[in-house]
Image: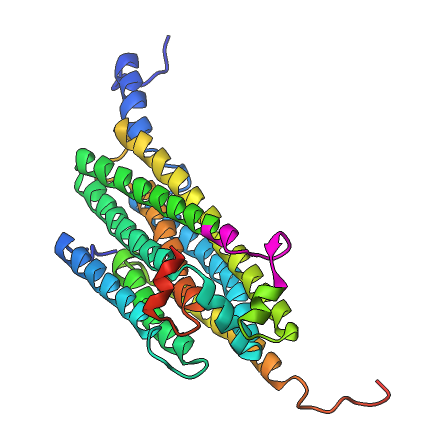
């Protein structure tokens, strides 16, 4: 004698397991997918709030030392490659546009557009890292790495006093730490977007279940916002002239 | 929760164009011969506008739930506390004479 309810045959239940459960994974603690989506989004916002504090402390340190060591910091900032810094800002902004369009099309259930824009986002993220890598190479070439490739005399010739040279090093350490940490965040973002791309290809996302795309997009936009603030705080402290274009 | 209207593709494109224009403006400002800290002040003001555009339009802050608004407000509050108390400390060091015997 079987106690199994008769309204769903084993085969139908198997099918349901393969479709409803796999494509719309609803965790048991939520009433519906909308509630689950909202909890996921909120969780990402809380994480981003901690990231604001993380980067905020670095910005505070940079700002405080800039107020104390203004002339040295501005001189050092003028040596940074603002052309690539500015280009990279635009690359990240456009990647953010693509990411938000990916969310838009995920919500609309347009799988091809979703995949295209996820791919473009990852591509621009990669382009950012390549440009950053080239910029690091120019920094290496121009002796801007304290402790490895750095020449105190060059800075004295530039008109700084020997006492100001350690301040230049301090600025450059801020530059390396902050852009490096930001680069790590971009790398994590690219990996997340590529995972989304694979999932989208498998048809995981539907108009009712697309929260991973939405949540990853929040992270991506945040990383973009950090760079928006890094540009004026690192690259644009001093006064530029068109002659600076030779740094490429 | 009632469904709130999401921005259109055109809105996203206009916001992105605006962000790029503001980036060009930020770089242009650095060519002006301004005294001391003004490059950073102006640059950060423009960056704040850009950040707000990203948060409001790209991160859908306006159409998020109210509890998300609280998280955003609290994050801004914490950041203000960090920056204000931190800078107050740095600005006022040495103003108070060192107490002898301590």
Looking at this rendering, what residue extends furthest in the right direction?
Answer: B101
| Percent x, y of residue A152 | 62, 64
- Residue at horizontal 46%, vertical 64%? A79
| Percent x, y of residue A18 | 30, 21
Q: How many marks?
A: 0
Looking at this rendering, what residue extends furthest in the top direction?
Answer: A1
Q: Does A148 lie within the magenta span?
A: yes
Image quadrant where residue A10 sits: top left
Q: Nearer the viewer, residue A160 or A16?
A: A160
| Percent x, y of residue A114 | 22, 38
- Residue at horizontal 24%, vertical 40%? A208
Q: Nearer the viewer, residue A217 or A152?
A: A152
Looking at this rendering, what residue extends furthest in the front direction?
Answer: A157
From the image, which quarter does the N terminus of chain A lie in?
top left
- Residue at horizontal 35%, vertical 35%? A194
Q: Which residues are magenta?
A: A138-152
From the image, which quarter does the C terminus of chain A lie in?
bottom left
Q: Is residue A34 above or below residue A139?
A: above
Q: Is residue B20 left or right of residue A4?
A: left
Kindly tell me whether residue A17 is visible in this rendering.
yes
Q: Is residue A106 left or right of residue A232?
A: left
Image quadrant where residue A57 sits: bottom right
Q: Is residue B11 left or right of residue A161?
A: left
Q: Nearer the viewer, residue A139 or B42?
A: A139
Q: Is residue A136 above or below residue A63?
A: above
| Percent x, y of residue A32 | 31, 42
Kindly tell me whether residue A31 is visible in this rendering.
no
Query: Which colour style is shown?
Result: rainbow
């Amino acid at each position: 004698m079987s106690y199994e309810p008769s309204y769903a045959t084993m085969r139908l239940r198997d099918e349901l397991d393969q479709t409803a459960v796999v494509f719309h994974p609803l965790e048991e603690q939520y009433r519906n997918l909308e509630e689950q989506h909202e909890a996921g989004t909120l969780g990402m916002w809380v994480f981003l709030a901690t990231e604001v504090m993380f980067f905020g402390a670095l910005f505070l340190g940079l700002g405080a030392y800039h107020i104390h060591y203004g002339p040295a910091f501005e001189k050092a900032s003028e040596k940074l490659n603002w052309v690539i810094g500015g280009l990279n800002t635009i690359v990240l902004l456009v990647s953010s546009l693509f990411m938000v369009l990916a969310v838009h099309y995920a919500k609309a259930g347009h799988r091809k557009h979703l995949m295209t824009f996820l791919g473009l986002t990852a591509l621009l993220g990669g382009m950012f890292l390549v440009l950053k890598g080239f910029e690091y190479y120019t920094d290496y070439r121009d002796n801007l790495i304290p402790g490895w490739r750095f020449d105190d005399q060059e800075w004295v010739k530039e008109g700084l006093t020997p006492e100001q040279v350690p301040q230049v090093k301090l600025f450059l350490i801020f530059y390396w730490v902050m852009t490096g940490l930001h680069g790590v965040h971009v790398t994590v973002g690219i990996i997340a977007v590529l995972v989304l791309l694979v999932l989208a290809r498998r048809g995981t996302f539907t108009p009712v279940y697309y929260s991973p795309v939405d949540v990853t997009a929040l992270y991506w936009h945040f990383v973009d916002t950090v760079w928006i603030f890094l540009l004026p705080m690192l690259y644009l402290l001093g006064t530029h002239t068109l002659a600076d274009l030779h740094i490429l | 929760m009632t469904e709130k209207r999401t921005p259109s593709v055109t809105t996203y494109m206009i916001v992105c164009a605006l962000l790029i224009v503001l980036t060009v403006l930020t770089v242009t400002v650095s060519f002006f011969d301004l005294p001391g800290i003004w490059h950073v002040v102006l640059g950060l003001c423009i960056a704040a506008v850009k950040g707000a555009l990203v948060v409001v339009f790209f991160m859908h802050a306006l159409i998020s739930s109210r509890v998300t608004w609280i998280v955003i407000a609290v994050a801004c509050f914490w950041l203000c506390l960090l920056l204000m108390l931190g800078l107050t400390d740095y600005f006022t060091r040495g103003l108070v004479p060192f107490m002898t015997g301590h």
